[in-house]
Structure formats: C-alpha cells, structure tokens
Image: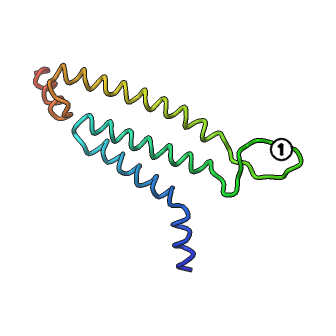
Amino acid sequence: MMEWLIGEVFDKYNYWISIVLMLIGFYAMIAKDNLIKKIIGLNIFQTAIFLFYVSLGDITGGTEPIVIEGQEVLYVNPLPHVLILTAIVVGVATTAVALALVIRMYEAYGTIEESEIIEKEREAGM
C-alpha cells in the first residue's frame, strides 16, 4: 500500500513541481513590497500554469497527432500546447507593460517600493 502511494506521488512529480512553483509565485506577489519582485512572482506563477497545462496534454504511450491509415494509435492532444504558446506571448507582453509601468512609477515617485508609493500618495492627498 505504502509503495503504491509513493509510486503514485513520484509518477506525478511534474504536478507537484507545478504546485510548488504556483505557491512560490503567489507568495512573491502577495508578500513582497518591491514591484520588480512582484513581477518576478507573477512570471513564476505563469510558468507554473504553463507547466501544468503542458503536463495535462501529455499521454503516456501517446504519439503526435498525425493520422496514419490502418493503424490504431493513441494520440496526444495538441490543444494545451497550442494554448500555452499563445499564453507565453501574452505573458511576455504583460511583463513588458508591467516593467514599463514600474519605470514610470519610479520616475514619478523615486521608488519602486509599494509601501513608500502609497505613503507618498497619502501625503500628496492631504
């Protein structure tokens, strides 16, 4: 029983890695005060999602989805991989826009620390 459980856990190691990366990225986005570190956390979280979807699309013993007449084979679903290619492009664009906003905030406030920016906003409002 215990060997079966250990085998199941280690057979699905890519899902466990994906979960750990999600937690690391989520922690960085929530707990860090530096805006660059938040963007890095967002990228780690995105990478975890990419790994998760690509892992879902793989089938043990599957082959590429090219139909060969007269052969009965198990095909791998290409849709998750195609969606992840699009998601990678969106992730790069999101990162570029976020970094541009951080540069603009640094020019305006002289810092990239979230708490300092909020404090300067409060002072300007009073």
Whether residue 28 sits left or right of residue 55 in the image: it is left
Q: Residue at x 44, y 54 (%)?
A: 19
Between 70 and 47, the one nearer to me in the picture: 70
* Position above or below: 15 against 106: below
* Number of numbered callouts drawn: 1
Circle 1: is it few (<14), some (14-19), or many (20+) Cα within 10 Å?
few
Q: Position of residue 76 (x, y in %)?
A: 69, 48
The image shows residue 81 at horizontal and vertical percentages of 60, 40
Q: Quadrant of the N terminus?
A: bottom right
- Given residues 96 and 45, the one toward you in this image is 96
Which percent across, then down, holds residue 21?
40, 50
Residue 102 in the image: state x and y as whole percent.
26, 26
Left or right of residue 108: residue 13: right
Residue bearing mark 1: 68
- The amino acid beneath tag 1 is Ile
Q: Secondary structure at mark 1?
A: loop
Front in this rendered view, residue 96 or 113 = 96
